[in-house]
Amino acid sequence: MDVPYFPAHRQRHGDVQRQSHIHAVDEEHSGRRNHRHSRISTGDLKLSLVSTPRLPRHPPQTTAHRFTNLDAAATRRLQRSITMEFTQFVVSSRDKALLYGDYSTYRTQLAHRLLTCRKKLSVATRYRGKYNHNSNDIKAEQLAEDINYAWLQVLTAERAFAQAMAMKAAHASNKKGITGHTRSHIVSRLDKAAKYAENLSDELQESASGASDVDRLEARAYAALLRGAFAFEKQAWELCLANYSAVWAIYSALSSTSSTRADVFRDLLTDTLEPSLRYAAYQLKMPRSKPIPIIARESLSSAHHVAATPDTSALISSINEIDPTVLQPKTAATTDGSESLETAAAAGIVASTRTLTWRSREVKIEDATIASAWAALDLAKARLEAHLVAGGARMAAKDMAAAYDDVLTVSQDAVDATKAAIDDLRTEGIPQSDPSVQVLYIARTAANYEMISDRIGRNRVLTGQHDGALAHLDVPRTKKGRHGKSASGYQEAPGRFIARLKEKIVLYDGTLQSLETIKELPGVAADAELSEQLDATAQYFTALKSLAIARSHTVVGNAANALALVKYAHEQSAAAAPILKKVAAAKADAAETAETAEKTSTLQSIYVSADDAQFLLDLLQAELQRARALVDIEKHQPQPSASAKTSTLALSETLGDYPARAVDLENIVTYPPRIEAIPIKPIFLDIAWNYIDYPTKAGAAGAGATAQPAAAQAEAEDDSAAEQPQKRGWFGFKR
């Protein structure tokens, strides 16, 4: 049996004898294996801050005995799963070392721990002996027999990693950065660390190792972490992104299953992995707002090589078995119906991707902010529709319009998100012809179109039924009468009716301005069908505006002006009705031919239904006949003769009065002029007041005469009071 050799000058005294079942081992080796009673030798003066987990000790055996003659205890150890906390050990070791020193100190500590581990396994290089290059080669059976073989690989990989990080930290203050030779040395050390970790992961995948599924996943994550650091320093961004994505997916899945180590996994994800993932994605020109789960899923699906993972599909399957929501998050954008949207909102689910279809263009929105804004817009519209259906006819027009505020706010957020994404790409120097920029421009046009459409829908709700085409002078009375009886209605004053018409005209003007804004959006001018639809919609609202103005002229008695405006409104409506009917029919056909017919929304928007267009056309035809009848009646009324003039005053003298009839252009001014009395103000009005006896002055003089005796009597009393001697001193005392 092989017995490890140790030099005589390193022997210790006071060693504790090992147990009886351990075979021939010298006293020095027995003393170094005992952790409680052994002393520190001269080679171990520097205490290590990294503590290797206490593991079961086994007697040194020969190579043949290790591989062929496994006893019953070894067989039982093969059958049970070994528990290794790779991540916990690595994270705690790095934190403790960096708390009191740097990576150079960490490397020194690892060297001492590695020597201790080698001596436990009897693979340490003898004094002045030749280094055995095969001492680090392990087999799955060795891992099942003694877990220290696994820690041997981990400590070796960590030492190489610490050396690379120490060199990187030493050159961090250099203004020129890390040179080529130093960078190649760092990359070489990281490659060595990744190879040791990959070797350990490959052996743990064997069934003979007895490792659990969690241990195998952690070993893969550790190998991918070191390989990702290697690719990061080598600036191989695709390889870096693929490995870091694998690490992120594994640790995210394990954090949901292990409550004891969830904090360790989350800290590692937040502090190390997510910033590195973001930077690698930035180098690959990915959107900054793209969520990490989508980045990880796409990079793993398209990755050609991941550390210790020959088949990435198997790794994805293993992760999905633990937590299927890590790489396939549920999004609110994929749900159907208002109930699903409400459930998604209650669960706090945020959309991460969305396929946007607008004007026969289907684009995939990968920006998380834009996709979330679209999902929020769908949710807000579903809530608004449910609110309006529940309210029904009980809600007033103002209350229904106020319910649109949330939808308008969310649609504005979608517009802002698309604008911010385009500005970010411009800042990065990406040209406008890039496909990602073109996708964002389509999304921006669609977002602006939806926002303006919702704004027009709110205005249509405020105008009333049939977009304000109907107008009634009889307004229902809401207040009760004197005896508690509510009247059915009352005749509205003409001035109040005209004021309501003015409010409608303002809403129509706002709608027409919104339609002009849509025409200025990118890509709208090139769409002939959409431009034709917008023109027809503008004609529809122009007809409504002309009808409202015509009604105001009818109220004040200008029948001729009302007839002209109604005729113009009829022409606009007649031109718009066929186009609007065609658009409505095309929309209905598209809904029928689709695999899943979309539910018709009851919300008002920019789309004018065929029924509304036909209703306005029929109404204008009736209004046109009515206006013609009023004008004809006015023409047949008897006109006053020209000789019977009510006033002979010239026009210049009656400018303050509105002429009731036609103006007499032959009597503009009085000619020839003649002298006439005109009222003027006296120049010295205050002086004239003193010399002119006005009626008011006579009353004032009489009042003064009666008051004169009383004034004389008061003056006499004052004189008598003055003749009395005055008292001196305070209160008249002592004087």
Image: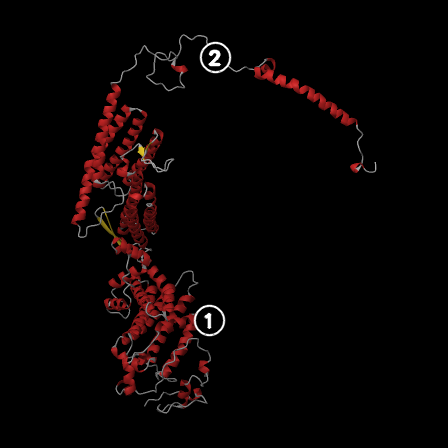
Looking at the rendered structure, the secondary structure element under dot 1 is helix
Relative to 170, residue 592 above or below: above
**Mark 2 lies on residue:** 678
- Residue at image position (24%, 65%) is 304
Q: Is residue 413 left or right of residue 600?
A: right
Relative to 430, residue 722 above or below: above
The quadrant in which residue 107 appears is: bottom left
Residue 635 in percent (x, y) is at 25, 19
- Nearer to me, 421 or 519: 519
**Mark 1 lies on residue:** 100
- Nearer to me, 645 or 588: 645
- Nearer to me, 662 or 398: 398
The quadrant in which residue 47 appears is: bottom left
Looking at the image, tell me whether mark 1 or mark 2 is earlier in sequence order.
1
Residue 323 in percent (x, y) is at 29, 66
Residue 454 circle label: none
Residue 123 in percent (x, y) is at 34, 83
Mark nearest the camera among 1 and 2 is: 2
- The crowd level at tag 2 (other Cα within 10 Å; few <14, some 14-19, many 20+) is few
- Nearer to me, 120 or 698: 698
How many numbered discs sit on the rendered protein?
A: 2
Q: Is residue 65 left or right of residue 34?
A: left
Going by the numbered disc 2, the residue's amino acid type is Ile
Whether residue 352 is visible here, answered yes or no, is no
Whether residue 214 is visible here, answered yes or no, is yes
Going by the numbered disc 1, the residue's amino acid type is Tyr
Residue 712 in percent (x, y) is at 71, 21
Quadrant, the C terminus: top right
Which colour style is shown?
secondary structure
Relative to 606, residue 113 above or below: below
